[in-house]
């Protein structure tokens, strides 16, 4: 995993809507690239409202190179809202500079997770080197309750 960015900023409009955040509410934004077989497989962007980063969840401020997914799925208070799935043109994917050479359409998904009833949004875009999704775009995409 390569951490591209982890800083406090304003979320994008669609992210604010997904999290039901009021305008100009800051969040910790974390962008990473996940690798498999030495290739970039997934670009992930997590949006954690500052109001979520309180109490025992303060530890999310300092993930460093630890994967957020491992923390989410090991937390007994975790719940997940329905998964949104989309095929995104590379020009609309808002990929980081490290991935601007990608020109093909990409599959992505995102969902709001809750830890102690506090929301955070995780978005994943599956990159061209991630072959299982390129061969059958329906693999792994399902709407979860």
Image (tube, helix red, strand yellow):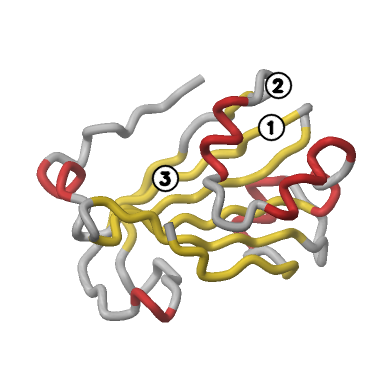
- Describe the element under mark 3 as helix, strand or loop: strand
Q: Which residue is mark 2?
A: 77
Of 135 and 58, nearer the camera is 58
Disc 2 and disc 1 in contact, CB within 8 angstroms: yes
Q: Position of residue 125 (x, y in %)?
A: 37, 55
Residue depicted at 39% across the width and 42% down the height: 85
Closer to us: mark 3 or mark 1? 1
State how far apart marks 2 and 1 are (Cα): 8 Å
On the image, which quarter does residue 40 sit in?
bottom left
Q: Position of residue 36 (x, y in %)?
A: 26, 51
On the image, which quarter does residue 14 sit in?
bottom right
Of 81 and 70, nearer the camera is 70
Residue depicted at 51% across the width and 19% down the height: 145
Residue depicted at 31% across the width and 70% down the height: 90
Q: Which residue is mark 1?
A: 114
Closer to us: mark 2 or mark 3? 2
Q: Which residue is mark 3?
A: 109
């Amino acid at each position: 995993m390569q951490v591209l960015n982890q800083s406090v900023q304003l979320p994008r409009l669609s992210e604010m809507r997904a999290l039901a955040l009021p305008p100009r509410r800051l969040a910790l934004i974390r962008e990473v690239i996940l690798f498999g077989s030495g290739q970039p497989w997934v670009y992930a962007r997590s949006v954690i409202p500052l109001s979520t980063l309180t109490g025992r969840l303060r530890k999310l401020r300092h993930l460093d190179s630890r994967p957020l997914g491992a923390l989410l799925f090991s937390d007994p208070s975790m719940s997940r809202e329905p998964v949104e799935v989309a095929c995104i043109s590379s020009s609309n994917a808002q990929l980081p500079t490290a991935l601007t050479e990608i020109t093909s359409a990409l599959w992505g998904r995102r969902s709001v997770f809750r830890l102690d009833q506090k929301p955070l949004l995780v978005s994943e875009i599956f990159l061209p080197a991630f072959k299982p999704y390129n061969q059958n775009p329906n693999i792994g995409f399902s709407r979860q309750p």
